[in-house]
Amino acid sequence: MPEIVVISGKGGTGKTSLTAAFAHLAKAAVVCDLDVDAPDLHLILQPEIETRQDFFSGHEAIIDPADCTRCGLCADVCRYQAVISASGGFSINPLKCEGCKVCVHFCPAQAIRFPERHCGRWFLSRTRFGPLVHAQLFPGAENSGRLVALLRQKARELASQTGRTLILSDGSPGIGCPVISSLTGTDAAVLVTEPTPSGLHDLQRVADLCRHFTIPIGVIVNKADLNPETTEAVQRWCEAENADFLGALPYDPAVTEAMVRRQAVTEFSDNGSSAPIRMVWARIVEQMQRTRSPRTAVTAAPVK
Ligand code: SF4
Ligand code: SF4
């Protein structure tokens, strides 16, 4: 099952708007929002949630006041200062608790419970572009990489159940744990950048990460006409690094207008950036087909 992940070295490059347009153009994809810390693809795709599941990861310590003898040993042994002493009693700050279980081990009264930590929720949804797999981590919750891995597994299951021939994912910005989890074992990464020196720098960082995992990359410069010189610098860098330059998209106010109307820009308008986005998508599909067997060939809408 071919998997493509759209990533960027930083936020604000237009990655999610582009993923929504690709989801519109791909006729047989399971779409996956892997930006679990701050998902926003659902704002455009307007999913109808069909399955909602809690996500648990790690453990947290919770003191049962009924059993606690208030000896204070847990506060002494906790290296993270997570145990709070107030009004003569003890409780645990969940934001500071690292789930190391030391307090549980030393508590002489067995007054500390150690349940799994409820970190967020994940969803299987229906959208006008096909199935969407998405999630929301709670603020401050950790293990986003594990949740990303879970979403990818659910997307693969959904794709094989529904006969879909592609998994198209919107990755997280940056190069951290959720991005690494998005990339491992994927077939190709589409890197979206903007034509600024910091955009080029962040592109190089995320490209290094892809290279580490031997993931083929393609590069798109968004709002390319705002700085043609840096766009050319990105193109030269792609040539030097043997990276596919997929295309340069113009700055297009219709992208924001489409977003306000909860539409992909390719749904909203045939002008502006829509035609170049269709060409870029056709190029991505062509490259995927070239590197895969006909059985798993990706389908796409015809380029207008
Ligand atoms: S170690 Fe156990 S009994 Fe002592 S204060 Fe902590 S929770 Fe209460
Ligand atoms: S589990 Fe570890 S981090 Fe959490 S309160 Fe106990 S000792 Fe502190």
Image (tube, helix red, strand yellow):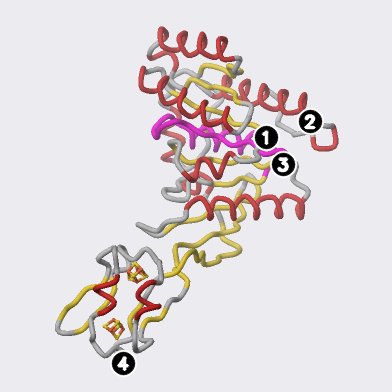
Image quarter in which the N terminus is found: top right
Determine the CA span between mark 2 and mark 4. 62 Å
Tag 2 residue: 292
Q: Tell whether label 2 touches label 1 (CB within 8 Å).
A: yes
Determine the CA span between mark 3 and mark 1. 17 Å
Tag 3 residue: 28
Amino acid on which disc 1 is placed: Asp
Which comes sooner in the sequence, label 4 or label 3?
3
Q: Is residue 17 magenta?
A: yes
User: Based on the displayed image, in which of its 4 quarters is residue 76 positioned?
Assistant: bottom left
Nearer to us: label 4 or label 3? 4
Q: Judge from the rendering whether residue 260 lies leftward or rightward of residue 91; answer left or right.
A: right
Relative to the observer, which residue lies in front, 227 or 21? 227
Tag 4 residue: 66
Residue drawn at (66%, 42%), measured in percent from left and top? 167
Q: Does 170 sit above or below residue 74?
A: above
- Magenta region: 2-29
Q: Is residue 135 magenta?
A: no
Determine the CA span between mark 1 and mark 4. 54 Å
